[in-house]
Image (spheres, rainbow, N blue to C red):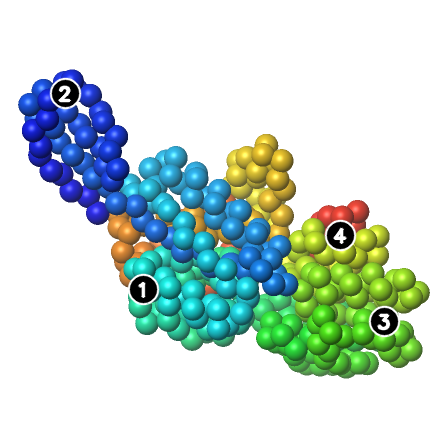
Amino acid sequence: MRFRRAARRSGLAGAFFGLAGGLVLCASEAFCVVEARADVVVGVAVPRSGAYVSVGEQVLRGVQAAARDANARGGLDGQTIVLDVQDDACDSNKAVAVANHYAAQGVRLVVGHVCSNASLAASEIYAANGTVMITAASVAAKLTDRGLPTIFRVCGRDDDQAKLSATVLAERFRDKKIAILNDLTPGSRNLAAATKENLNRIGINEAVATAFSAGDADDAALADRLRDAGIAVAYYGGDAREMGRLVRISAERGFKPQWFGTSAIATQEFSTIAGPASNGVLMTFYLDPRRKPEAAAVVAAFKAEGAEPEGSTVYGYAALQALVAAGDFAHTTDSKRIAATLHTERFDLVLGPVGFDAKGDVTAQGYVLYVWNDGTFSYAK
């Protein structure tokens, strides 16, 4: 929103006066023009409590850096970006409450959520209100398969991740006993089921498929059960904390299978909890944008501040960057026009030149295989 208001004022000719909500330009002693610019509020819905805090912090750091950089270049369509950060704790009910908060406040641009169950629950409210929601980390295929016109993601899809996981298991461990584990959370359960389905379709059957309650399970008993079953490869789609505990406790009990995780463990928290036992753990995760030349300046800025933009950090940056790019292209802050622009145009982001398909999925490269060593992960050979 911009408007100009004339006002008589005594003052210095040609001077600029900063006022709340605008700028006063005095062309003469007798005549001033007040140019007011409204801020554009962008919601940021991430877990700041619960099991996925570390991923939420990654996304938030990325969004904050993108907002800072965008504002230094003039904001979103000339308006200063202000972030409204809300904690959804990766809980569906809390995510709905956050979405209703944004609706009541008139916030129509949202970066979030992190966990797929939270995004799925909140996205119905966003779609009904014409709010653009763009997630940096929710991978559930259902999120975009519904074709809601204002729902987007810059990350990959869990069905693509499951296909890669099954392919790796088949190609590298065909003759090994494989266990597929899930902790009953929606994301873990869906990834385990999809990986199992893809693996079975290839013609390989797992030796063990089991579910347990993360945080309440006797990790030592589970490790012993897998060891006694002769498991050589353990696939688990759970969070960094629980997998870190399983890997560490298993190693302490002399059980050292080939552990195989997902994008949920792409955080330093996993290796910190697992300790030396994290060495050699495989993981599927999005293409590491830190290696892309388009992200070099952003990565360098993070490192100059003493921060490593690991995991979903750069994807958080890309999510807000996409909103800004679409708004600037269409010269608007209107959410529906930004959504339409995201669907039809391509943008130069830290992920490279990308667009969004009719579902809202990003056209960037999907998942690749990584391996953990010495507290960090790199591409697996």
Q: Is residue 155 visible?
A: no
Q: Secondary structure at mark 1?
A: helix
Per the image, the residue denoted by label 4 is 272
**Which quarter of the figure has residue 356?**
bottom left
**SS at badge 2:** loop
**Identity of the residue drawn at 64% across and 72% down:** 188
Seen at 57% across and 38% down, the residue is 302
CA distance separating discs 4 and 1: 40 Å
Q: Which residue is more in the foreground, 105 or 370?
A: 105
Q: Nearer the viewer, mark 4 or mark 2?
A: 2
Judged left or right of residue 223, residue 272 is left
Secondary structure state at the residue bearing disc 3: helix
Which residue is labeled 1 in the image? Answer: 104
Residue at 88% over, 74% down: 224
From mark 3 to mark 1, how far is it between C-alphas?
47 Å
The disc at residue 220 is 3
